[in-house]
Image (cartoon, rainbow, N blue to C red):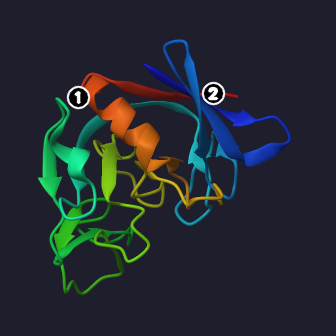
């Protein structure tokens, strides 16, 4: 279990607790919300299981040091974010006709990117897509609703994680 809460006085920054160790993390620009909606920038309140992950082997060597199913990120991997598309909140091959997020990012935030089960099954239109556990910017600026940690923290946590790990976002 990984427990995430907002840092006091900083709703878009958080504290992630793994056992007795606490790490800094970034949260969504909309803080934590119990009523997550597509595009609101909020991190969903609740428990989300880690399903699997993606990594850039050329940038994040520790991507295979985990019990999670990890897939290398190629240049054609995207994630659909259009709520009325049949592939909403699913990986897609790009180029793709509907709006999507490119997983191979120049800013390296997805060099290690774990998929959380938010709005996966069942998928509900407009309830939010691409809620990941990924790498943070150096200054922990807000995400679009994800939980993000440093590359060093991710490398430390990955060997401990499995598809039974739950990320619990609390207030």
Residue under label 1, please give it: 163
> Which residue sits at x=75%, y=36%?
7
The dot on residue 30 is: none
Quadrant placement of the N terminus:
top left
Q: Which residue is mark 2?
A: 170
Q: Residues within 10 Å of mark 2 (few under 14, many from 20)?
A: some
Instruction: Give the answer, above or below, for where 42 lies relative to 122.
Output: below
The answer to which image quadrant residue 45 occupies is: top right
Residue 53 left/right relative to 3: left
Image side of residue 15 versus residue 76, left or right: right
Residue 30 image point, x, y percent: 69, 55
Which percent across, then down, holds residue 96? 21, 83
Q: In this orientation, which residue lies closer to the viewer: 109 or 59? A: 59
Image: 16 above or below 92: above
Q: Earlier in the sequence, mark 2 or mark 1?
A: 1
Q: Position of residue 2 (x, y in %)?
A: 47, 24
Q: Quadrant of the C terminus?
A: top right
Q: Secondary structure at mark 2?
A: loop
Pointers 2 and 1 in contact (CB under 8 A)?
no
Marks 2 and 1, Cα distance to the nearest angstrom?
A: 20 Å
């Amino acid at each position: 279990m990984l427990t995430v809460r907002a840092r006091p006085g900083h709703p878009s920054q958080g504290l992630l607790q793994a056992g007795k160790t606490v790490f800094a993390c970034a949260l969504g620009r909309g803080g934590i919300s119990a009523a997550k909606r597509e595009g609101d920038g909020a991190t969903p309140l609740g428990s989300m299981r880690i399903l699997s992950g993606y990594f850039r082997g050329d940038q994040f060597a520790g991507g295979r040091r985990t019990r999670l199913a990890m897939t290398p990120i190629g240049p054609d991997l995207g994630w659909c974010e259009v709520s009325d598309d049949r592939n909403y909140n699913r990986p897609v091959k790009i180029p793709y006709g509907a709006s999507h997020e490119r997983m191979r990012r120049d800013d390296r935030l997805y060099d290690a990117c774990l998929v959380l089960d938010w709005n996966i099954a069942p998928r509900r239109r407009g309830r939010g897509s691409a809620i990941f556990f990924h790498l943070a910017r150096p200054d922990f600026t807000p995400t679009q609703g994800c939980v993000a940690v440093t590359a060093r923290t991710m490398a430390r946590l990955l060997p401990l994680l499995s598809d039974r790990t739950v990320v619990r976002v609390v207030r």
